[in-house]
Image: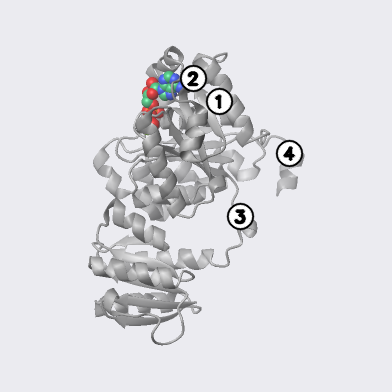
Amino acid sequence: MKIKIITPDSDRARAWAEALSAADAGFSTTAVVKPLHGADPLAHGPKPDLVVAEAVSMQDIDALDALAAASPDIEYVLVAADLGANVLMRVMRAGVREVLPTSMASGALTVAVLDAVQRLARKRPAAPAGDKRDGKVLTFVSCKGGSGATFAAANLAHVLADGGQRKVALIDLNLQFGDALLFLSSERPASNVADVARNIQRIDPDLLLSAMVPVSPGLHVLAAPEDPAQAIDVSAEHVEAIVRLARSMFDIVILDSGRSLSPVTLKSLDMADQVFVVLQLTLPYIRDGKRLRDVFRSLDYPESKIHWVVNRHEKSSRITLDDLKITLGLGQFVTLPNQYDVVANSVNQGVPVATVAPGSAITKSLTDWARQIAPQATQARRAGWLSGLFGQRPAATAESREAR
Ligand SMILES: Nc1ncnc2c1ncn2[C@@H]1O[C@H](COP(=O)(O)OP(=O)(O)O)[C@@H](O)[C@H]1O
Ligand SMILES: [Mg+2]
């Protein structure tokens, strides 16, 4: 793979080039020591497959935009100062999939550059069929605070676990004020996403599982940090590693994602097999729904990846589902009924709604929805050590032998 490094800092250029060459004989690396906006990476030598570029000014970001538009087949790793949501969106739209903070200590930054390039290199043969991916990743986004995304994510997770028929993980990526665990349990988590991120070098199924709270048969929750300040300890790379591992351990991985467009949020959207956007049938939600729809389009997500969930739906609503279809230009929606008493009861006790009100309309809607997402229970079919980790014996010995 041909890699071009562009940075005005000659020490960094040398460090990154050395690290890349040492890591993989298949990497052929060249460096241009110039500001991005003064360099034309395609001017000399063969066309690179991947560009590692450092941006130090808005001019550099403009140059990257232009470059990516001209050569969309090149992959980009961007090293830059804290970008802010708008600029981050712009560079993601331009095709940048890895953004690393320029503020990192130089040694750590070199390692991060190497990691990012290796990750992209691994993805390059781009054969999703051969991917060892197992579990489905469902990412929940709230159109606006209070739309019910966390309620829906947590309770769908509970219903999907189906009393232990499926292994389901719920990971709270609302890093600052995450409350997903509270919808299902009143237990205090011993550990959380930030703790796992700090131990990312040692992450394995044991560590991940022990950081999670088992809330009901088959369902494990990785809680958000208690202290909002710990959110900064969690990077998009951490999230990628955690979700990748979770996917190999669970049938379904549900991410309750933040609302602000951060690298962590974008990672959770990128990794999703399906994104569920939760809104309500009132104008402020619909307005934000349109904005999100535009964001997804500019990220080139296929429409089939995005699913819209109308929560707190009432048949008598002034704005109808048909109005929403027209406004957002969409096909189908999932709807969940407005059931104040039942939901308040569940939320206040920290007990899943299907447990406090098994016969309620909202439980029925959740069950129907779960059936659409995962038609059959997967049975507790995970063999050997993984079953051991989950504290269960393999369901059927003959089957588990076959599974190996
Ligand atoms: N279908 C519903 N019917 C009645 N109340 C609901 C329903 N869904 C959510 N709520 C209420 O809305 C509150 C906010 O939901 P939450 O999931 O925290 O929103 P978000 O995560 O989108 O900010 C919940 O605490 C719950 O009391
Ligand atoms: Mg929430």
What amino acid is labelled 4 in the image? Thr
Kindly identify which numbered label has been placed on residue 353: 2
For the residues labelled 4 and 3, the Cα–Cα distance comes to 23 Å
Name which quarter of the figure residue 159 lies in: top right
Name the residue beneath numbered marker 4.
397
For the residues labelled 2 and 4, the Cα–Cα distance comes to 34 Å
The tag earlier along the polypeptide, 2 or 3, is: 3
Name the residue beneath numbered marker 3.
132
For the residues labelled 1 and 2, the Cα–Cα distance comes to 10 Å
Image point (56%, 40%), residue name: 252
Image point (56%, 23%), residue name: 365
Q: Which residue is farthest bottom? A: 45
Question: Residue 399 location, x and y as percent?
Answer: 74, 41
- Circle 3 or circle 1, nearest the eye: 1
- 99 vs 242: above or below: below
Name the residue beneath numbered marker 1.
366
Q: Is residue 107 visible?
A: no
Please tell me whether mark 1 sits on a helix, a strand or a loop.
helix
Image point (52%, 30%), residue name: 322
What amino acid is labelled 2 in the image? Val
Asked if labels 2 and 1 touch by Cβ distance under 8 angstroms, the answer is yes
User: Is 132 left or right of 316, judged from the image as shown?
Assistant: right
What amino acid is labelled 3 in the image? Lys
